[in-house]
Amino acid sequence: MSEPHSDAILDVTGLNCPMPILRAKKALAALDGGQVLQVLATDKSAPDDFAAFCRQTGHELLHQQNRDDGVMIMWIKHR
C-alpha cells in the first residue's frame, strides 16, 4: 500500500506513553474533519495505543508502517 496523504506531521520519537497520544490529540484538534495526521513514534506500545485512541475517539487509523530504524508511522484521519 502506498502511504496516505498527510496534512500535518507530528514527530513524537523518543517520547513514552502517554505523551505521544496527548500530543496527537492536540495536533488533531488543530485539523479539520477529514484531514490526516502522520505520527512518527518510537514507543513500542504506540501501535496499540493509537489503535485504542482511534476506537475511543472516532478518528480513523488509516495505515501503520514500521521503518527499519525503529520508527513507527501511523496515519490518522480526523473524524
Image (cartoon, helix red, strand yellow):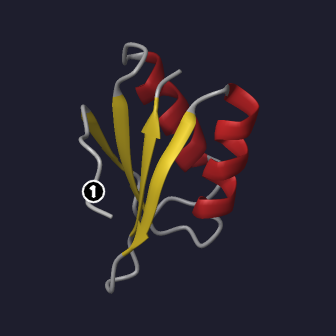
Position of residue 47 relative to residue 69, above or below, is: above
Compare residues 63 and 14 and report the one nearer the observer: 63
Compare residues 39 and 77 and report the one nearer the observer: 77
Compare residues 29 and 5 and report the one nearer the observer: 5
The image shows residue 69 at horizontal and vertical percentages of: 32, 83
Q: Residue furthest bottom?
A: 68
Please give the name of the residue rendered at 67% of the width and 54% of the height, measured from the top-left corner.
49
Tell me if 6 is positioned left or right of 58 in this view: left
Q: Secondary structure at mark 1?
A: loop
The image shows residue 65 at horizontal and vertical percentages of: 41, 68
Quadrant that contains the N terminus: bottom left
Please give the name of the residue rendered at 46% of the width and 61% of the height, measured from the top-left corner.
64
On the image, which quarter does residue 33 sit in? top left
The image shows residue 20 at horizontal and vertical percentages of: 53, 48
Position of residue 70 relative to residue 32, above or below, is: below
Q: Residue furthest front?
A: 1
Q: Amino acid at mark 1?
A: Glu
Tell me if 27 is positioned left or right of 21 in this view: left
The residue that disc 1 covers is: 3
Please give the name of the residue rendered at 72% of the width and 38% of the height, measured from the top-left corner.
55
